[in-house]
Image: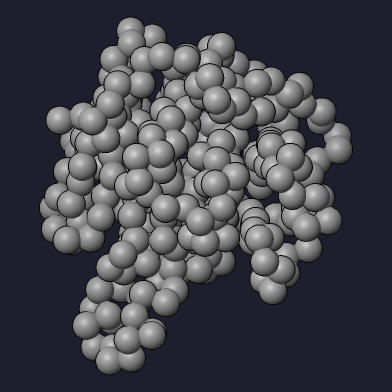
Amino acid sequence: MAEEKNSSSKPKETYPLFSFSNPNQQGLGFGLFGSPEKPLPPPPPCVEVLLSEESSTVKSNVEPIVINDELTLLKGRVSTFDVFGVANSDLVAGKYEGGLKLWEGSVDLVKTLRSEVREGRLMLEGKRVLELGCGHGLPGIFTCLEGAAVIHFQDFNAEVLKHLTIPNVKVNLMKKFSQQHLLITNKTDVGTPDVRFFAGDWSEIHQLLQCGLNMDQQKVTDDSEQKGCDGYDIILMAETVYSLSSLHSLYGLIKKCLRCPSGVIYMAGKKHYFGVGGGTRQFLHLVKEDGIMEACLLAEVADGSSNVREVWKFTFK
């Protein structure tokens, strides 16, 4: 069923399994969409983080990530303790959602996007792109290098955007755009991308993002120019489906923000996340039950370094 196997040109990077500072506080229920056993603290407020707000207090070490022989992206490395005061933890419920780690799915997604572009199945030039749970932001960065007009990066933590995502965007895009072009969003400048950053919980962040018309609104709209005029053409997400408790809010956000009926979603993740309960198949179950989108498996990776990983493409029926 998968169209390709991403088993070559593996980046020299150690990809951790999930660990928690306090497993008893994760509040993971049982069942497919169980309710949390303990309430989480309220999420941080939703804010836009400016490109100029890059942190100067914690310096990151820049490392190359080899996608293949023709493409290498750069990423920073910062300490979880330096940013959040948490040592040896990938997740702290309600406080930190793992954005400082480079997860395998991010690289899988870049590889798949590149294959989609090279084989003529994906055109990125001029497109509006949203990367959810971006962390390092490598998939979004790739789309910008390929000519996307709008690239918005979202992460739960503003700290992740300031300490990692923004520096990664700058160091990768400086080869193509000057810093002045990146800092000044001017939609009249031909070839200058609209790069923005947003922090907040998936249940609330739609208030800041560019939402599209939903399917019901499309049906009652007669103005052909208005149909699908808003929202994002492409939504990217890597390793965002690890938690059962957040799948509904994630999918709800996608439906608010994805351009209908032409929008497409690319999702990379593990089949199952042991210890946290989520996985690509749980998300697929949710989409199938909703009934408005169809899914296509683009890549399956079983290289022995982790649980089986997948990349899926979702489109409106």
- Residue at the (23%, 78%) spot, across then down: 216
Quadrant for the N terminus in the image:
top left
Q: Position of residue 261 (x, y in %)?
A: 28, 68
Can residue 272 be seen here?
A: no
Q: Residue most toward the top?
A: 304
Instruction: Answer above or below: position of 123 versus 217.
Output: above
Residue 25 falls left or right of residue 70 = left
Q: Position of residue 2 (x, y in %)?
A: 21, 29
Q: Quadrant of residue 149?
A: bottom right
Q: Position of residue 137 (x, y in %)?
A: 57, 39
- Residue at the (30%, 21%) spot, across then down: 5
- Residue at the (59%, 22%) spot, across then down: 65
Instruction: Answer above or below: position of 243 versus 4.
Output: below
Can residue 49 be seen here?
A: yes
- Residue at the (48%, 60%) spot, across then down: 127
Residue 208 falls left or right of residue 290 = right
Colour scheme of this structure image? one colour
Front-most of 77 and 205?
Answer: 77
Query: Number of marks in the image?
Result: 0
Q: Position of residue 290 (x, y in %)?
A: 17, 57
Q: Quadrant of residue 266?
A: top left
Instruction: Answer above or below: position of 91 versus 177.
Output: above
